[in-house]
Image (tube, grey):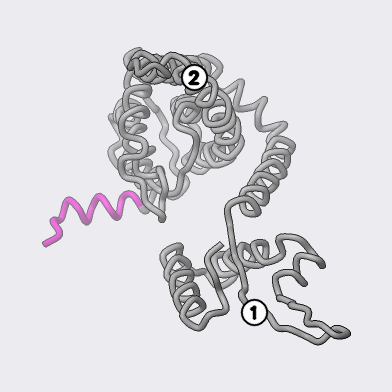
């Protein structure tokens, strides 16, 4: 049964669609440690295909929201609801977004304004963070660790884990302090160049996705026939013909189909996965799809 207080809370939250508070509070100095600790251990704990890291983001923001809106519970509820929606970014760079978000709310920004900055930053920062961590630091420290472990020593593995953890902590601490120090100024500076940054990030992102698709997506059509050529026989296949026309056309077609199903037909990720299973099983059973 829903209590009267819950009903009142929901009704009040709906009044804060543009989310503004007359006298927002300030966060304490301990907020830096809370941001780093919560981001490190809880950001992806509630990861799902609907909101990605959204629930974790709202949870990390909660201690700051309690301090900023301690005298405005309705706005607090509204902020928690609105900031538990979709979010996805590199873990080590997420504290920068959270710090800026907090400073904007402290300065009296509306819910919509703060969320627009959050959504604008998460893509570019994800690209920067993933590139530095996954494609730079991880290979470097892994190779160093392997060199020490070739004779069976565990030191190499420990060294890699410790080095990556120190890098992770250093980045999180640096971007958190940067976000809290620069606050509104860095938001204004980024807002002026956000279109250019977003365009560059989109181009890089599309290039990376296409490259990964061609590398990892394997799709072979086992449709072939023979034809008489002079006194002999020549074997032909759909795959060879398509590769001669446009190499890797089949993987690109498969990825384009998935994009269309998600963006145009509004399919969920689960439906796309099930569709892939059905097509693969039926195709393998009939015989026109073979393992790569």
- Whether residue 176 is visible here, answered yes or no, is no
**Which type of secondary structure does the marked residue at label 1 adopt?**
loop
Disc 1 target residue:
223
What stretch of residues is rendered in magenta? Answer: 1-13
Residue at 67% over, 39% down: 201
Please provide percent x and percent y for residue 35: 37, 24
Farthest-out residue, front? 231
Q: Quadrant of residue 83?
A: top left
Examine the residues drawn in magenta and state their main secondary structure.
helix
Q: Is residue 12 left or right of residue 241?
A: left
Please provide percent x and percent y for residue 70: 28, 29
Residue at 45% over, 48% down: 86
Judge the density around disc 2: few (<14), some (14-19), many (≥20) Cα neighbours within 10 Å: some
Q: Is 229 located above or below residue 114 in the figure?
A: below
Quarter holding the C terminus is bottom right
Whichever of labels 2 and 1 marks the residue nearer the N terminus, that label is 2
Disc 2 target residue:
141
The numbered dot on residue 145 is none
Farthest-out residue, right? 230
Residue at 44% over, 27% down: 102
Residue at 52% over, 16% down: 178
């Amino acid at each position: 049964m829903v209590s009267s207080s819950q009903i009142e809370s929901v009704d009040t939250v709906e009044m804060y669609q543009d989310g503004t508070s007359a006298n927002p509070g300030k966060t304490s100095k301990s907020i830096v440690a809370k941001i780093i600790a919560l981001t490190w251990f809880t950001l992806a704990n509630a990861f799902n295909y609907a909101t990605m890291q959204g629930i974790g983001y709202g949870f990390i923001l909660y201690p700051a929201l309690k301090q900023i809106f301690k005298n405005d519970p309705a706005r607090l509820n509204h902020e928690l609801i609105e900031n538990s929606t979709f979010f996805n970014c590199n873990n080590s760079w997420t504290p920068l977004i959270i710090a800026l978000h907090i400073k904007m709310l402290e300065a009296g920004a509306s819910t919509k304004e703060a969320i627009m900055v959050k959504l604008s930053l998460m893509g570019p920062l994800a690209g920067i963070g993933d590139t530095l961590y996954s494609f730079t630091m991880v290979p470097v420290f892994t190779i160093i660790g392997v060199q020490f472990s070739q004779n069976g020593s565990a030191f190499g593995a420990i060294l890699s884990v410790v080095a990556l953890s120190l890098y992770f902590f250093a980045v999180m601490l640096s971007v958190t302090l940067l976000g809290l120090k620069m606050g509104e100024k860095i938001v204004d500076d980024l807002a002026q160049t956000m279109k250019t940054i977003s365009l560059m990030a989109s181009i890089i992102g599309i290039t990376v996705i296409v490259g990964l698709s061609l590398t990892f997506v394997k799709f072979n059509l086992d449709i072939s026939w023979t034809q008489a050529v002079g006194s002999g026989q020549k074997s032909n296949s759909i795959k060879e013909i398509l590769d001669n026309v446009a190499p890797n056309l089949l993987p690109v077609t498969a990825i384009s189909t998935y994009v269309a199903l998600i963006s145009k037909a509004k399919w969920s990720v689960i439906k796309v996965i099930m569709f892939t299973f059905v097509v693969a099983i039926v195709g393998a059973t009939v015989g026109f799809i073979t393992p790569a």
